[in-house]
Image (tube, rainbow, N blue to C red):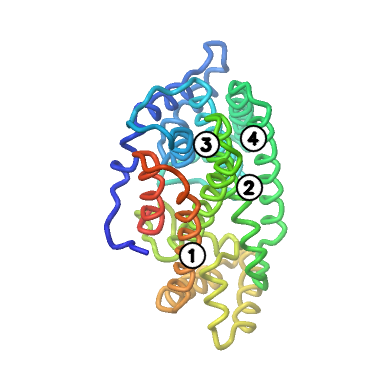
Amino acid sequence: MNTKTTVEIGKVLQPIQAGLAQVEAKMKNVESSLFAPLAHAFVDLIGSGGKRLRPTLALLAAQVYAEQSDTPLFPHIVALAASVEMLHTATLVHDDVIDGALLRRGAPTLNAQWNRGATILAGNFMFARAAYFAAETNNPRVIRIFADTLETIVNGELHQLSARHEFRQDKEGYYQRIYAKTASLFAAATEAAAVLAGLRESEVQSLRAYGHNLGMAFQIVDDILDFTGSDATLGKPAGSDLRGGTMTLPFFYFLQSHPQAEQLIDQMQASYLAAEDGDSLQWESLISQIVRELRASPAVEAARREAEAFLDLARASLLGLPASPYQRSLLELCDFVVQRTY
């Protein structure tokens, strides 16, 4: 596998720039009758950016048989791409409420500006918009994929909440959580796009497998960056997942190689309970120490190898598809995922 050539995300997105512009415009279109503060917050949230990977996947997958870049898009493809990105954004709004997060990508969250109830309702509105866009595809199978994916995401979030600060977890439980949290929506984007494009069922399943495996790798890399990234690139302190009680793959491997893993877990649980009682100094000091030790351990490379294994599976899923600018971009996304630093 070659990951030495640096992939520029701008080149990856080049074949679908016009499509992404249509998706962006569709998401920002707000009815004049909408409650004004919600309308302003809605447009700000959509305009705050992000990588737009999910609509990118939908647009690329829908056009894998197109020979030229920027071929005309049917409105239902744009609706699907807007739906998956809106669903993703809605989950972020609710995640920020659940986590009590005041910053995302270094900017204040809606949760930092509105009260809890209002923020939840804003997220609900975005879920409704996502469902509306899904319905605009006029395809019952796509609408079912949307509904199943939303159910998977919510179920995964509930499992993650119930397992917080429980660090004696196996790797299979971690995989189930990151599938629900991230990979399920990647897979939905590529599968639904292939359905709308009228591809054969074998091709639909190949593109779903591509999205699934890319999404798994993406989340593993995200979890690695949570330890190795800087505050500036992450927009939050390193080790935020661990600080919030979430067990991720790098920490799993760190424990596997730690000479006193059980004692460390006991120390973490005692420090966290002290922090709950108002004494957070020991907890913060311990997290900082773990971040430093994990960065210097084999855990980062072990987790990265797993991400690369998922990317190999994603690439293999594309072998039966014809060479085109869109297929090439899907392949290049695999390199981008493992190379990214944000």
Which circle, 4 or 2, is nearer the viewer? 4
Residue 86 location (% of width, % of height): 54, 32
Disc assigned to residue 110: 3
* Residue for point 49% across, 57% down: 217
Looking at marks 3 and 1 on the same chain, the residue that comes earlier in the sequence is marked by: 3
* Labelled pair 1, 4 in contact (Cβ < 8 Å): no
Q: Residue at x 51, y 68 (%)?
A: 284
- The answer to which of 196 and 84 lies nearer the viewer is 196
Tag 1, which secondary structure? helix
Q: Whole-Å distance between the Cαs marked 3 and 1?
A: 36 Å
Up the image or down, 126 lies above or below 306; here it is: above
Mark 4 lies on a secondary structure that is helix
Asked if residue 22 lies left or right of residue 118, the reply is: left
Label 4 or label 3, whichever lies nearer to me, is 4
According to the picture, the residue beneath numbered tag 4 turns out to be 146
Mark 2 surroundings within 10 Å by alpha-carbon count, few (fewer than 14), some (14 through 19), many (20 or more): some
